Amino acid sequence: MLELRKITKRFGEVLANDHIDILIAEGTIHAIVGENGAGKSTAMRIAYGFYTADSGEILIDGQVRRIESPHDAIAQGVGMVHQHFMLVENMTVAENIVLGAEPGSAASLDLSGASQRIRALSEEFKLAINPNAPIETLSVGQQQRVELLKALYREARILILDEPTAVLTPQEVEEFFAILRGMREQGKTVVIITHKLDEVLAISDEVTVMRDGQVVGRLKTSETNAAELARMMVGRDVLLRVEKTDAKTGTNVLGLRDLRVMAADGTPRVDGISFDVRAGEVVGIAGVEGNGQTELIEALAGLTEPSNVSGQVEFEGRNIRDAGPRERKQMGIAHIPEDRHRRGLLLDFDLAENSILGVHYRKPIVSHAGVMLDNGAIDRRAREIIKDFDVRPANPALPARSLSGGNQQKLIIGREFDLQPKLLLVAQPTRGVDIGAIEFIHRKLIALRDAGCAILLVSAELEEVTALADRLLVIHEGRIVGEVDPKVATTEEIGLMMTGGHK
Amino acid sequence: MKLFNELVFPLIAVIAAFIVGGIFVLIIGDDPLLTYQLLLGSALSWPDGIGYTLFYATPLIFTGLAVAVAFRCGLLNIGAEGQLYVAAFAAAWVSIKLGGTIVKIGGTDVNYSWASLPAVLLVPIACLAAILMGGLWGAIPGYLKARFGSHEVINTIMMNFIGIALVSYFTQYYYKVPGDPIMQSAEIGAAAHIPRLGSFIPGIPTRLPLNVAFLLAILACALVYVFLWKTKWGYEIRATGENPSAAEYGGIAIRKQIVLAMAVSGALAGMVGINEVLGYRYRYYDGFSASYGFTGIAVALLGRNHPVGVFLAAILFGMLIRGGIFVDAFTDHVSKDLVEVLQAVVILFVACEAFFRGSFNRFGLLRRSKV
Amino acid sequence: MRAIFNYTLIFSMLRLATPLIWAALGGLFSERSGVINIALEGIMLAGAFTAASVTYYAGNPWLGLLAGIAAGVFIAGVHAVACIRFNANQVVSGMAINILMVGIPAFLGGAFFASTGSTPQIAKEHLIPWTPVILAFLMVPVTWYVLYRTPFGLRLRAVGEKPEAADAAGVSVKLMRYSAVLISGALAGVGGAYLSIGQSSLFTRNMTSGRGFIALAALIFGKWRPVQTMLACLLFGFTEAISIQLQGVRLPSGEDIPNQFIQIIPYVLTIVVLAGFIGQSRAPRALGLPYQKER
């Protein structure tokens, strides 16, 4: 039994966990649900000793335990599988599993003995993992099972799984759940962190709901339903409806013919995609994350090495496959990247300097002799974006780092909208953004569509793509597996296509 | 408040350095206070102290700016030392070849030169030679990073050794006056000399080696400021240094920026050659640099990679070098090596500063050797 | 030409490669744990100066060697604290230590021995010209074994490759990196000591003259692996031996062979290797990155 009592954790300004109490009963599968940023992962990382709580205590089997490092947690029988796998890619499965709990003496590492135990564990829990395989040769699903083995090898009684299904296809999810049920039968306790309600209902015995750093409820799964959980998660009924009229479509803006994108290591990520996006419509792409969406958008934005892209990318009838990002921006292709910290912002630059990224080299930002920056023009542009997109605080001299996620996103969206694009590539526009900003961003996107812009939208939130898109394409393993009308298609239907099982 | 924040850490670093240095002085049985009094007094006396301080600061302004420009692009240029050597040699070579240098060997005059240009042509050409050669020597590791992703830190270190060996070879085998026991080139033509400040500013004695290159250094500070913060090129370099992925997304060719920043960096380091060859020694002297290139790292860090800061930090280090020579001569045990200890401690402290500011992202591109 | 290639040359190569091997193996421990060690040069200087001073005073090279190791560990400790405790930029910290170690020996030597930074001559019977050579070549398989066949080595490699994975597995990243950098200091300290009380008989100002950097080059050339690194050290030791042998040798045409071209061979080779012309040299993935938990 694992219990968190009055745990509080603060990161700078943000109160990630606010006096939370979580009780996990032995031998159960317990789900912890909540929106992004609700504090689920933080709470469980505290239980695993990855973070130390500012206050509060952790009890295992009714005893207060000091867990100040993963080492302590492991000693108490707690194991954790992180959302991003904690595996050293160029080492073998066995090496990864024994790391930190090595068999043999300090002078000699007994890997062959360990391999036998790993093989036995793998068979016991039906994981089918070869201990001698290097991690980099394994699929995502296999790597996840290595993570499970790592915890089992350490004789973990309590397994914490952080968003374990985010990277899995629905079939893999089924297999994975079967493994978890098997573990429960062997007496293990499983904690699964997720924001997917159908999975909560499918796998868990009990569920704890978190919102804004607090625990808002603990329920028996058999006595609740998706609607109730959703209401608790967001604090109101989730009815993601976007006010919009039918699309008035114009000519073809973007045409893809047999587009293929390769990863740097030569594996295909986008595998022969063809579709069109017309002026005045939103084309949505639905799919499990990691099925080529990122690579598709990056390639369309000109951010992929041209040698890794083949097929045709037609923009207003011209093949622009080999054009660079600057050329594409000049043609009228704007891009709201999926990861605003990695791609979208210069975090230590001020808002004014961020507002000119991408147009910094041309008029009116550059004035004299085509070289000197015009501070007046930069300031005017920044203020305009800040005003039109309600960026707060409204001070162009602040570093972008100091803004909240929602305001950072609004700044990026403002900057890209200001290009008056003919085509907008937009990925995960509302990830990590508060509810108010989400509605604002959705309205702005629809307004841009109504002004005649062609929009290609990728989002991991199925609800978001169905609400915004006029046409919905489903992607699976780098291929478009079907197109549906988002107004009539059901979640089940789309979900089935996302598995690649249905055409 | 912002200015205060910018100044407080460098000041702590300098004070810490003086404390650590003081402990070393105590260990060897001298009086730290007396030593520092002597050091600062000799560096700030007028005119010789200040004159020499500024003279020693001149190369450090150039190398400090060089390191700072590379830093702003997220690159660590450890190669300023090599860049300034090849540049100084290039300046000397041009000034010999086009400056009408004639050398007496065994009683006969041997003409080392191709032409004898007037000063108005020769000086700019020689300066340009230093700038271009330094720029080239910087651009090579820049290109290697942009093209092959090889780490500029290692390559600039390697280029230091290669550059220094090559110019030593050319000096030894081609441009030394036969029989000269010193590893130095023949003297450059008089038309290539740039004037000492004392020759046209009243009140400054002409015996001070402080020369026009110091004014060039001030000009370079101003130009670097304008370049980095007022031009689109500077914006692109800084954006690349801050976040290469975002820069790429903003349509900035980051590989080009890496080469450009390293070339500009090398060119600035190369300007040391102007001070050394055209303004001071009037010849290429093998091994002339008192680690100016490496001290430039300290200058840039202490000066927060900003031209104004670099200028102030270079003056401080100029004072240390000037004072160090005095301390060497006028104390029982303390040698001028004290200056290196002070420098090193300053760098160590400034290097740890990121921790106290809670920011790790100051070396953007450095985090990945593959672009 | 035949006169040049003889046993003397081989012995010369082995002795010249020895300080490189010690320093490069030191660098290997540090860098495989994820800490860039450009400070090898400075650590070697610390080892060389301390070993020479202590040997001179104590009349015992083994005491001198131990003192050299201690000095190396101490200076590496400064680098470790800066890099691991304070997340300093590792290259900058390393450069600072190199500058510091040009200064301190000269400063102390100048005061204690009334010289411009060198120690007095050490009597011939107090030198250890061969033992460190033999030990250096023994250290190569030892390093290999530690790295690939012990729990310590497994953790070391994990910490340098993916520190968050090691952390999650309950391995202390800081502890591993501290040990690695301190080991690095001990080994490079031996390399430095060998220079002053093995190869020559006194410490002179800046006597490493870039050997720390050549060792680093050898480490890169050897792709951060022990045996390959040793081979690279032998190659670089060989070029140095050749360049010493060729001094004063004249070509049939009467010209001498420019030493400088032989000296730069290691540096040129390193650039070529780093550019990927001779196989890829992949650094440990977390090299140079301070470890901080993600938020």
Image (cartoon, coloured by chain):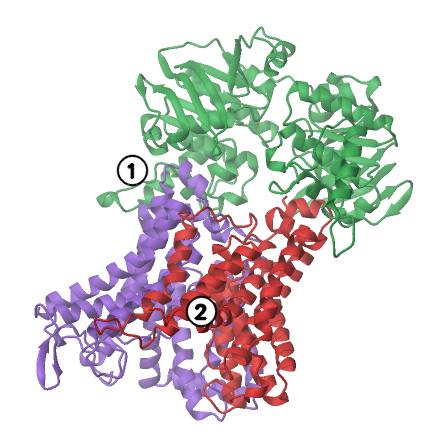
Chain colours: A green, B purple, C red
Of circles 1 and 2, the one toward us is: 2
Secondary structure beneath label 2? loop
Examine the rendered structure and indicate whether residue C59 appears above or below residue C191.
Answer: below
Q: Measuring from the top left, give residue B77's x and y in whole percent.
A: 40, 59
Q: Measuring from the top left, give residue B358's x and y in whole percent.
A: 58, 54
The residue located at (63%, 70%) in the rendering is C73
Q: Residue beneath label 2, please? A: C210
Q: Measuring from the top left, give residue A157's x and y in whole percent.
A: 84, 37
Query: A423 or C276: nearer the eye?
Result: C276
Is residue B283 rendered to the left or right of residue A474? left
Query: A224 or A305: nearer the eye?
Result: A305
Inspect the image, locate mark 2, and give the three-letter code of the amino acid beneath it: Gly
Quarter in which the N terminus of chain A is drawn: top right
Examine the rendered structure and indicate whether residue B252 appears above or below residue C94.
Answer: above
What whole-number distance in Å separates the C-alpha atoms at marks 1 and 2? 47 Å
Quadrant in the rendering for residue C198: bottom right
Secondary structure beneath label 1? loop
Is residue B365 rendered to the left or right of residue C197? left
Inspect the image, locate mark 1, and give the three-letter code of the amino acid beneath it: Arg
Residue A53 seen anywhere in this rendered image of the structure: no
Chain that bears disc 1? A
Farthest right residue in view = A62
Q: Measuring from the top left, give residue B320's x and y in whole percent.
A: 42, 79
Quadrant in the rendering for residue A24: top right
The residue located at (47%, 16%) in the rendering is A282
Query: C284 or A65: nearer the eye?
Result: C284
Q: Residue beneath label 1, please? A: A362
Quarter in which the C terminus of chain A is drawn: top right
Is residue A445 rendered to the left or right of residue B52? right
Examine the rendered structure and indicate whether residue C275 appears above or below residue A285.
Answer: below
Given contact means CB atoms under 8 Å apart, are the residues at marks 1 and 2 in contact?
Answer: no
